[in-house]
Amino acid sequence: MSGAPTVAVLRIGHRPERDQRVTTHVGLAARALGARGMYLAADDPGVIASIGDVASRWGGDFFVENDVPWRRCIGDWKAGGGRVVHLTMYGLRMTDVIDDIRREERVLVVVGAEKVPGDIYGLADYNVSVTTQPHSEISSLALFLDHLFEGKELNREYPDAKIRIEPAKAGKKTVER
């Protein structure tokens, strides 16, 4: 996806006893829809292993880092010239700011689980509302990435994939290498 920013996701507020499935799906959606990696601001090796297993079989160079201090992650990202986008119901409309964000070189997308710390709103360069209605962080991330990459991520191929799906009108066809 040439010309598009390099994107990583920072998952905050993850509760290992409750959020494993949702956080895993945040990582899988991020990978499938064009992000380069995910930082998890919690200690949950099971989530890391699940996403890593998918990436190793289905291809790409998606990274996942466990137990990342979120403040340091944001600070390091900004120090490297990146911009921070916080997905929230309370931000600016995505459709109003997506063109500006698309022009950035590096974008860190912050996705919360439980209520996010108020500091996030001040640390973010963009507080972005995918809609002003309650819905899931997975759908917010998916819609944001799709708009950011203008749909180009939907046909992305992974040359190093051990497994890939062969599109078919009916039935399921996978190819293993």
Image (cartoon, rainbow, N blue to C red):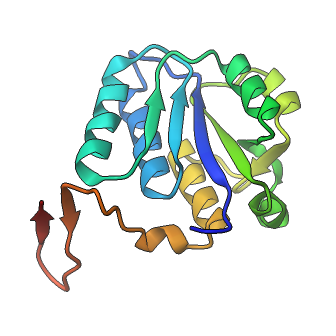
Q: Tell which of 170 and 132 is nearer to you.
A: 170
Relative height, residue 138 to residue 158 (above, below): above
Point out residue 38 in the picture as x, y percentages from the top left corner.
Answer: 52, 36
Write the residue at 63% across / 15% down: 69
> Dividing the picture into quarters, in which one does residue 72 lie?
top right
Q: In this view, does 20 lie to the left or right of 165?
A: right
Write the residue at 14% across / 82% down: 170
Q: Tell which of 61 and 95 is nearer to you.
A: 61
> Dividing the picture into quarters, in which one does residue 2 lie?
bottom right
Q: Tell which of 111 and 59 is nearer to you.
A: 59
Q: Tell which of 130 and 46 is nearer to you.
A: 46
Relative height, residue 56 to residue 139 (above, below): above
Write the residue at 53% across / 50% down: 35
What is the quadrant of the C terminus in the image?
A: bottom left
Q: Is residue 65 left or right of residue 98?
A: left
Relative height, residue 98 to residue 169 (above, below): above
Point out residue 137 in the picture as x, y percentages from the top left corner.
Answer: 56, 43
Q: In this view, does 167 lie to the left or right of 26?
A: left
Write the residue at 42% across / 74% down: 155
Point out residue 105 in the picture as x, y percentages from the top left corner.
Answer: 74, 53
**Tally of marks:** 0
Q: Which residue lies furthest to the bottom in this view?
A: 169
Point out residue 52 in the picture as x, y percentages from the top left corner.
Answer: 32, 35
Relative height, residue 94 to residue 125 (above, below): below
What is the quadrant of the N terminus in the image?
A: bottom right
